[in-house]
Image: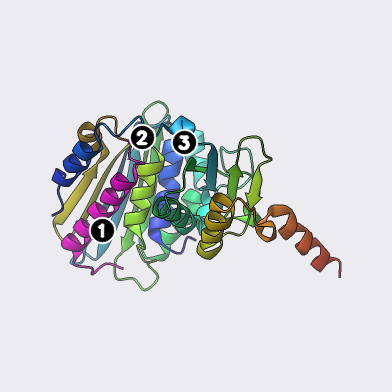
Amino acid sequence: MKSLEELKAIREKMQGQLGLREEENAKTRVLVGMATCGIAAGARPVLTEISDEVQKDHVKDVMVSQTGCIGLCQYEPIVEIYEPGKPKITYVHMDKDKAKRVVKEHLEGGKPIVEFMLHTVRDAENSAKNK
Amino acid sequence: MMPEISLSILDVAENSTRAKASLVRIGIEIDTVKDTMVLTIDDDGCGMTEEQVKRVEDPFFTTRTTRKVGLGVPFLKQAALAANGDFSIASEVGRGTNVRAVFQYSNIDRMPLGDISHTIQQLVVYHPETDFLYTYSYNGRSFALDTREMREILGDVPFSEPEVQEYILSYLTENKQEVDHGQVE
């Protein structure tokens, strides 16, 4: 059985390192919708992917968390990105691969991905309907 | 219905955290002789009135304001009943809510348990204000994860610390493997 001993070791290693990296310094917030609609549409693996990629690449000043239903259930899984001084960006119909691109291109590269944004997807749907 | 039982667990436990529970107990008990999988989610959150409890199994009931349909509890109930099982929910204002779902383990219509380890890890990591006591048992063998114990060891080191997140996931994955030898789908 895996025990709590290992956790004690982690704690000891971490001691003294904390405070260097305060959560309040996290400038960008990434929110994944995790209500029934999001979960049913596949939000759990999306959250895992974002969290894993952010940790793996040591992306600085990013805080990943989750949120409830934002009322756009048909567009789930939804990922919202809040950057200080910039308008909120809403990515829709996320999956693992798209989530990975969001981390690489937007969070690391500073280039938001227009094709995944709510307005792009909605416009495409509307023009398809009007044809 | 959710494609995995673990996703229903995530969904219903999210309700508990939104109900301001300080402790959420999640139990999974599999007995292949009795042919049952019993799932319990008990919280000490704000609870519901009798009227709300009656309505919560109804898909057109929800406390949220962003949409008019609440499918979390109905999905779990449907999944249990479809697998020749049973479902109950009891609640009291100010005391909390108890959800219990029983599945016939071998039933062809029982949804797979799915990725329960990631589910529990996410609940723990993304709800630092809430404590979780998770117990998993398979034919009498069992293990538990108690965030109160972990919190005591960690002190001011948060669950969101990458190494801690990783530890929690491997604690869940390795202990589950030892308990059920990877037999459970």
Q: Earlier in the sequence, mark 2 or mark 1?
A: 2
Label 1 crowd bin: few (<14), some (14–19), many (20+), radius 10 Å: some
Please give the residue where the numbered disc 1 appears in the rendered image: B173
Residue A129 x/y as whole percent: 81, 66
Amino acid type indicated by mark 2: Thr
Residue located at (69% from left, 53% from top): A118
Residue B122 x/y as whole percent: 38, 48
Any part of residue B60 in sight = no
In the rendered image of this protein, does residue B31 appear above or below residue B100?
Answer: below
Q: Quadrant of residue B160?
A: top left
Q: CA distance from mark 3 to mark 1?
A: 27 Å
Please give the residue where the numbered disc 2 appears in the rendered image: B130
Q: Are marks 3 and 1 on the same chain?
A: yes
Q: Give, as a single range, the part of the protein colored magenta.
A: B158-185
In the rendered image of this protein, does residue B100 appear above or below residue A46?
Answer: above
Of residues B20 and A28, the one drawn nearer to the viewer in this rendering: A28
Any part of residue B179 in sight = yes
| Magenta stretch, main secondary structure class | helix
Callout 1: helix, strand or loop?
A: helix
Residue B67 x/y as whole percent: 64, 44
Amino acid type indicated by mark 3: Arg
Amino acid type indicated by mark 1: Thr
Colour logic: rainbow
Q: Earlier in the sequence, mark 3 or mark 1?
A: 3
